[in-house]
Amino acid sequence: MDLNSSIAASRLIAQQRAMDVTANNLANANTPGFKRQQVQFADWLSRQSGIDVPRGGQILAYTQDRATWRDSQQGALSHTGNTYDMALTGEGYFTVNTPRGVRLTRDGRFGAAPDGTLADSSGNAVLDSNGQPLRIPPNTTRLAIAGDGTLSGDAGPIGKIGVVKPNDPARLQAEGATLMNAPTGTAPVAAPGIVQGALEESNVQPVLELTRMMNDAREFQFVSQYLQAESDRQQSAIDKLLPANG
């Protein structure tokens, strides 16, 4: 593949990645606690080592997919009236115990499992401030959740919901739409600001994401057409330069 096609192909791969990320944002526009993502591109410069660029030459700039960053902006609150639903109005994440270990989430769609364990929508146990599963006593008819995460039932305090923040937010690893893995560890949040009977909506703005998707698709189409035209040009040149058989 010649240089022109190689550079164009790098852009094509980057645009495909951008469309995939935008499509995922749109798919999760109604997922509570979801944070929109965006790709970050950079130029990868190709130089000859140890010499200056010759007269008439230039440095080759390939498109490089450097990273995907997550927008941590707070989503709007939606009041559901469900006793077990919870929304965080400040920093931090709830902690849940999954088959892969402890994970972080801002999706507060919680409920009581048959054994009384407070669990998320996937059945993962919600953990308290000591990293232990929270259990609602049998026959509890009234459940109150304070802003600091303290749970109280008919007989008094039950426990305190664990809310933590990652030591290095830039290294959070997404697992699915709402779960996060914090490989660098976490620290407790002193004042999490929990709202009972509400959910934090996704911070995705569908109109903005749809506009971005259309722009990405146009750029992808433009580069694809360029590559096809370049391929046709090279084939035409080959056909003219090589003698016909026979």
Image: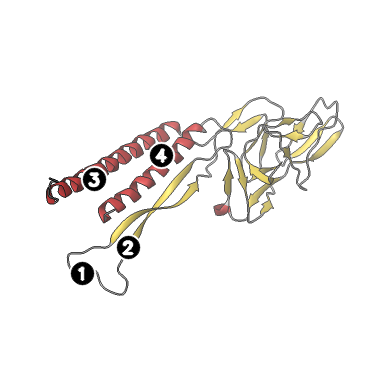
Disc marking residue 231 = 3
Identify the disc placed on residue 170.
Answer: none
Q: Residue 241's spot in the image, x, y percent? A: 13, 51
Callout 4: few (<14), some (14-19), or many (20+) C-alpha neighbours within 10 Å? many
Tell me the crowding category of disc 2: few under 14, some 14 to 19, or many 20 or more residues within 10 angstroms, Cα based: few
Say which label, 4 or 3, has the lower sequence index: 4
Q: Determine the CA span between mark 2 and mark 4.
A: 26 Å
Look at label 3 and name its amino acid: Ser
Is residue 163 in sight in this rendering?
yes
Q: CA distance from mark 4 to mark 1?
A: 37 Å
Under mark 1, the amino acid is Pro
Residues marked 1 and 3 touching at CB (< 8 Å):
no
> Real-space Cα distance between discs 1 and 2?
14 Å
* Residue 61, placed above or below residue 98: below
Q: Which residue is mark 1?
A: 54
The residue pinned by badge 2 equals: 46
Distance between the alpha carbons at the discs numbered 3 and 2: 23 Å
Q: Identify the residue position indicated by label 4 in the image.
A: 19
Q: CA distance from mark 1 to mark 3?
A: 27 Å
Q: Earlier in the sequence, mark 3 or mark 2?
A: 2
Amino acid type shown at disc 2: Ser
At x 58%, y 37%, the residue is 33
